[in-house]
Image (cartoon, rainbow, N blue to C red):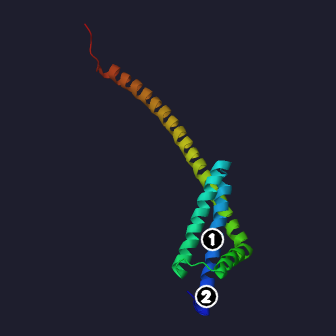
């Protein structure tokens, strides 16, 4: 099925856009893999899953635009879009993702540390409160014994 030059240019633009999207997804996957630092086996499994996902996304683009028909200029469009992304935006996306990850880690550590310090402060306050309560109880007991002895509120045993 042959199309017009205009439809082929639109197809090229769509595949370039798909290449840019795949480049961004690839960089985000690389950052996630760096952040999680999985072992070799898990890395291989995740790589296979990512590339199956990428192939599915590319196929969906092709299916939506050209009913799954693959032409050479479409492959060039994907490669061109991926390359343009890597040159123009790649460093910025990776840097932003890494910065976001590091900020989230810092925030998580601050929150955990704050919770630990808060729990420790509550524990110390509880200990002070219990000590104060014991002192007050002892004073109240002494006071009650004095009142009982002065007014005769005790039971005489025979």
Q: Quadrant of residue 6?
A: bottom right
Dividing the image into 4 quarters, which one contains the C terminus?
Answer: top left
Q: Quadrant of residue 17?
A: bottom right
- From the viewer's perspective, is residue 27 above or below residue 78? above
Residue projecting furthest to the front: 1
Provide residue 39's location: percent of width, then percent of height.
Answer: 67, 48
The residue that disc 1 covers is 22
Q: Count residues near mark 1 (Cα–Cα under 10 Å), then give few for <14, some for 14-19, many for 20+.
A: many
Provide residue 138's location: percent of width, then percent of height.
Answer: 44, 26
Q: From where the camera sits, is residue 25 visible?
A: yes
Residue projecting furthest to the top: 158
Residue projecting furthest to the left: 158
Identify the mark at residue 81; answer none if there is no mark: none
- Of residues 134 and 143, the one nearer the viewer is 134
Provide residue 43's location: percent of width, then percent of height.
Answer: 65, 53
Q: Give the residue drawn at x 30%, y 22%.
A: 151
Where disc 2 sits, the SS reads helix
Q: Earlier in the sequence, mark 2 or mark 1?
A: 2
Provide residue 1's location: percent of width, then percent of height.
Answer: 55, 86
- Of residues 12 and 2, the one nearer the viewer is 2
Q: Quadrant of residue 59?
A: bottom right
Residue projecting furthest to the right: 87
Q: Which callout, 2 or 1, points to the residue nearer the camera?
A: 2
Q: Give the residue drawn at x 72%, y 72%.
A: 86
The residue that disc 2 covers is 8
Where disc 1 sits, the SS reads helix
- From the viewer's perspective, is residue 53 above or below residue 74? above
Q: Give the residue drawn at x 60%, y 53%.
A: 108
């Amino acid at each position: 099925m042959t199309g017009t030059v205009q439809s082929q240019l639109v197809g090229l633009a769509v595949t370039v856009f798909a290449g840019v999207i795949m480049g961004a997804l690839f960089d985000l996957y690389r950052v996630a893999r760096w952040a999680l630092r999985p072992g070799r086996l898990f890395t291989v499994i995740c790589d296979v899953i990512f590339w199956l996902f990428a192939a599915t996304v590319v196929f969906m683009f092709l299916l939506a635009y050209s009913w799954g028909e693959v032409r050479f200029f479409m492959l060039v469009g994907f490669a061109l879009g991926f390359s343009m992304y890597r040159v123009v935006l790649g460093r910025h996306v990776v840097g932003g993702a890494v910065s976001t990850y590091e900020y989230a880690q810092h925030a998580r550590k601050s929150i955990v540390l704050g919770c630990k310090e808060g729990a420790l402060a509550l524990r110390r306050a509880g200990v002070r409160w219990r000590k104060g309560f014991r002192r007050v109880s002892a004073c109240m007991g002494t006071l009650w014994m004095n009142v009982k002895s002065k007014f005769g509120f005790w039971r005489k045993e025979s």
